[in-house]
Image (cartoon, rainbow, N blue to C red):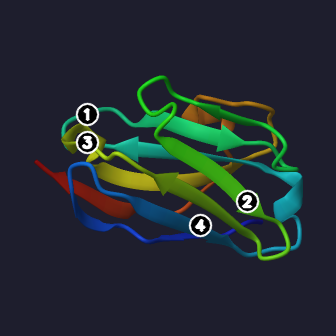
Amino acid sequence: QVQLVESGGGLVQAGGSLRLSCAASGRTFSSYSMGWFRQAPGKDREFVGGISWSGGSTYYADSVKDRFTISRDNAKNTVYLQMNSLKPEDTGLYYCAASRASRARVGGAYDYWGQGTQVTVSS
């Protein structure tokens, strides 16, 4: 069982930056790959990016590539999402999730989810 709690969301102007954190409970955190997803009002949840269990591999949606960076600290049971050059279309509720699959980009491959943290980017 893994419990996930996101933090770090907020209101930021376009072009600004935010760093989201996702703290995990459980001693098996390092055995899971981790993903970030987001959902804007009236839209489907979409994959943002993911990181392998070791942190050695990251993968991103085209819409955030070169602007967002995912990292993890297994000693702290935490995964991060650094978001730079934010755009209004990045607005949404951001979720972290844990998966036993490798390089999963669909929500159905993830076993555990956090409650989400809101990110709002103003123009």
Sequence-first disc among 4 and 1: 4
Sequence-first disc among 2 and 3: 2
- Cα gap from disc 1 to disc 3, whole angstroms: 17 Å
Confirm whether residue 115 shows in the render. no
Sequence-first disc among 2 and 1: 1
The mark closer to the camera, 2 or 1, is: 2
Residue kind at label 3, given as amino acid type: Lys
- Cα gap from disc 2 to disc 4, whole angstroms: 9 Å
Q: Secondary structure at mark 4?
A: strand
The mark closer to the camera, 4 or 1, is: 4
Sequence-first disc among 3 and 4: 4
Q: Quadrant of residue 81?
A: bottom right
| Relative image position of residue 15 (x, y in whole percent) | 26, 49
Report which residue position mark 1 lands on.
43
Confirm whether residue 57 shows in the render. yes
Classify mark 1: residues with Cα within 10 Å, few (<14), some (14-19) or many (20+): few
Query: What residue occupies the far left of the structure in this picture?
Result: 123
Report which residue position mark 4 lands on.
22
Which label was assigned to residue 72?
Answer: 2
Q: Quadrant of the N terminus?
A: bottom right
Residue at 76% x, 71% y: name it.
77
Q: Nearer the viewer, residue 91 or 86?
A: 86
- Cα gap from disc 2 to disc 1, whole angstroms: 28 Å
Residue at 55% x, 68% y: name it.
21
Sequence-first disc among 2 and 4: 4
- Cα gap from disc 2 to disc 3, whole angstroms: 24 Å
Q: How many marks overall?
A: 4
Residue kind at label 4, given as amino acid type: Cys
Residue at 80% x, 43% y: name it.
52
